[in-house]
Image: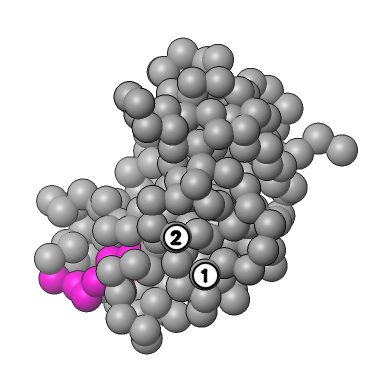
Amino acid sequence: MTALLEARGLRVEYGATVALDAIDLALAAGSRTAVMGPSGSGKSSLVHALAGIVPLSAGEVWLEGGRLDTLSEARRSRARLARMGMVFQFGDLVPELTLVENVMLPLQVLGTRAATARRRAVEVLEQVGVAEVADRRIGAVSGGQAQRAAVARALAHRPAIVLADEPTGALDTVSSEQVMDALTRLSVDQGTALVVVTHDHRVAAHLDDVVVVRDGRISVGIPA
């Protein structure tokens, strides 16, 4: 059975530094995986390589049975927008837009009409519990609310997979639990595969599987 997202012999170098080396990883549709490891181990580089954000020094990335890494930058961006959702540590929402406008943005880029995009954005914001602040800008909401809006934005277009890089790293314990609850619940409801980079065992407990990265390689054993 073809994996949804697969890395084969992945190697990523930043100058003389080898960030990833000989990575093989296959992610199935609907899977929920935590990527753990010490600081500087390469876990964030792995997610960025899987998303086609960083260039590969060697190896291949396959998305839904097709090569992602050999596409042009424009086609990689389009594939990422259409079939993936991304959540970063600080959300990366547009501060000049309201929460609902932020969630609408990728939908509209994909060609969804404004009225339809707004309805879908409001629906997903309700599902993550921040509909009451949907018309506020980022500066007028809490960090946890903004991050739940980032989760809504990542899942609004019903992607095949969501890649989240330390999505709770800047949050307190309560907000972290709210974000992970929203992220896992929505991904389960939509049948979306989920990969979460984290150093927090409480966050990893929300996922079904754990991949440990040490010194740029997939490691066997319990994460530190």
Q: Would you place residue 174 above or below residue 204 in this image?
A: below
Q: Earlier in the sequence, mark 1 or mark 2?
A: 2
Residue at image point 60% right, 23% down? 59
What secondary structure do most residues of the magenta stretch adopt?
helix
Q: Give the image quarter of residue 146.
A: bottom left
Asked whether, in this view, residue 102 is left or right of residue 138, the answer is: right
Instruction: Tell me if I can see residue 219 in this picture.
Output: yes
Dot 1: within a 10 Å radius of its alpha carbon, few (fewer than 14), some, or many (20 or more) residues? few
Q: Which residue is identified by label 1?
A: 224
The dot on residue 165 is: none
- The question of residue 145 being in magenta is answered with yes
- Horizontal and vertical percent for residue 195? 56, 54
Dot 2: within a 10 Å radius of its alpha carbon, few (fewer than 14), some, or many (20 or more) residues? some
- Horizontal and vertical percent for residue 20? 50, 37
Q: Would you place residue 199 above or below residue 108 in this image?
A: below
Read off the magenta span: 140-149
Type of amino acid at the residue the image marks with label 1? Ala
Q: Which type of secondary structure does the marked residue at label 2 adopt?
A: loop
Q: Are marks 1 and 2 in contact (CB under 8 Å)?
A: yes
Q: Give the image quarter of residue 190.
A: bottom right
The dot on residue 38 is: 2
Which residue is more in the foreground, 50 or 188? 50
